[in-house]
């Protein structure tokens, strides 16, 4: 009776949506306090059981007797499954709590499209006015911008604004003006200075950032435009950090940089936040893969050439090679040539005289 009251309490707890861990603890305490013999005897009072089983399936046979109880097996299985489910649901990964980035249509990713060079020029302006203060692009040459975003004279003028370390003819360390053959300069001399200036965070280099992050353009766009206020119940960010649900760990060491009208475009484009983010992301996509336009052009030429070769080969096969493929060569015994060519047509039936005669009659 005492065990039955405990079981009723457990069932009521399940009905009242108790937690899995409470259910497991109650089941464990119940199994520990009740012996297997008393448990089997009590369970037969209200649960069907199968008894009298013997090896061979005959009740009168000899051998060990097997006694099974639905109640014992069922409750034990439920307890084991509850433990497994609770342990599985109790493990929460940080990746599962991150907000998934959206999927946008990027025209330059289509096979028959190219980069928007006006957007690339605007993106370079965003990088120079907003991003260059912290992020480097030291694996990208100035000369790569020529005839893509700027003219050669404009690139020379921009490169000359920076000083680069060099040596003179006598081996002395000097500083000279930048040239189009130089890499784009870094804002800090080394990583230590970069971390000291950014509260311990190291701003990554942006040359290959588009291909270095999963999600590519979609992730960068969501990251740059996804800054939010800290939701209720969430820990406040540390000094120098900001809350961003698209960032791994939520707290990013870069404050929000893109706002409406934060950049004054030279071509008069309205600088909405989404437009600014789109332009800088297209520029970063181009710096990560600057030869995409040429590769697309070569691919289209290769496909067109292959299609032309296929057409020419088909026409040649049907006109030139078809006669060779349909040619038939017959070997005959000397003196029987007339039996093969008497009808003026060489075919597979000439070696059969009866068939030849029937064909000749039909032609008459």
Image (cartoon, grey):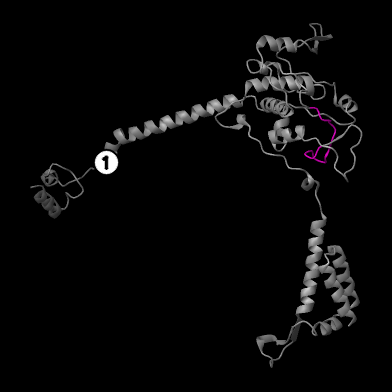
**Residue 178 as seen in the image, left or right of residue 9:** left
Vertical relation: 234 (above or below) 110: below
Vertical relation: 44 (above or below) 277: below
Q: Where is residue 110 in the image (x, y as percent from the top left)?
A: 58, 32
Q: Which residue is drawn at 74% across and 22% down?
A: 126
Pick out the residue farthest to the left.
Answer: 364
**Residue 39 as seen in the image, left or right of residue 222:** right
Q: Looking at this view, is 1 or 275 the one in front?
A: 275
Q: Position of residue 251 (x, y in %)?
A: 85, 38
Q: Quadrant of residue 268?
A: top right
Vertical relation: 174 (above or below) 42: above
Vertical relation: 92 (above or below) 324: below
Q: Position of residue 215 (x, y in %)?
A: 70, 37
Q: Where is residue 298 in the image (x, y as percent from the top left)?
A: 53, 26
Label 1: which residue?
326
Number of disc labels: 1
Give the position of the N terminus as an image quadrant: bottom right
In the image, is residue 253 part of the stretch drawn in magenta? Answer: yes
Q: Looking at this view, is 108 or 213 the one in front?
A: 108
Which residues fall within the magenta stretch? 244-257
Query: Circle 1 sits in a helix, a strand or a loop, which is it?
Result: loop
In the image, is residue 104 part of the stretch drawn in magenta? Answer: no
């Amino acid at each position: 009776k005492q065990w039955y009251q405990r079981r009723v309490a457990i069932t009521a707890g399940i009905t009242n949506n108790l937690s899995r861990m409470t259910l497991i603890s109650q089941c464990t305490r119940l199994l520990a306090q009740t012996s297997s013999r008393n448990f089997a005897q009590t369970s037969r009072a209200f649960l069907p059981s199968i008894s009298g089983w013997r090896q061979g399936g005959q009740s009168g046979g000899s051998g060990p007797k097997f006694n099974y109880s639905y109640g014992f097996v069922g409750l034990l299985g439920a307890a084991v499954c509850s433990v497994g489910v609770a342990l599985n649901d109790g493990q929460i990964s940080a990746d599962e709590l991150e907000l998934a980035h959206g999927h946008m249509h990027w025209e330059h990713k289509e096979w028959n499209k190219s980069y928007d060079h006006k957007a690339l020029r605007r993106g370079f302006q965003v990088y120079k006015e907003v991003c260059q203060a912290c992020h480097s692009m030291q694996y990208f040459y100035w000369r790569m911008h020529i005839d893509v975003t700027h003219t050669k004279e404009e690139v020379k003028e921009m490169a000359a604004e920076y000083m680069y370390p060099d040596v003179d003819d006598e081996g002395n360390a000097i500083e000279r003006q930048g040239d189009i053959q130089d890499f784009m300069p870094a804002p800090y001399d080394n990583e230590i200075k970069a971390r000291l200036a950014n509260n311990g965070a190291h701003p990554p280099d942006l040359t290959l950032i588009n291909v270095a992050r999963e999600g590519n353009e979609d992730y960068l766009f969501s990251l740059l435009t996804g800054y939010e206020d800290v939701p209720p119940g969430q820990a406040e960010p540390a000094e120098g950090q900001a809350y961003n649900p698209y960032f791994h760990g939520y707290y990013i060491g870069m404050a929000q940089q893109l706002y409406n009208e934060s950049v004054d475009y030279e071509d008069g484009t309205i600088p909405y936040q989404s437009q600014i983010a789109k332009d800088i992301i297209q520029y970063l996509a181009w710096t990560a893969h600057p030869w995409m336009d040429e590769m697309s052009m070569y691919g289209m030429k290769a496909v067109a050439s292959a299609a032309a070769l296929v057409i020419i080969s088909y026409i040649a096969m049907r006109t030139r090679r078809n006669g060779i493929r349909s040619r038939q060569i017959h070997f005959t015994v000397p003196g029987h040539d007339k039996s093969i060519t008497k009808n003026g047509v060489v075919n597979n039936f000439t070696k059969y005289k009866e068939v030849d005669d029937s064909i000749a009659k039909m032609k008459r």
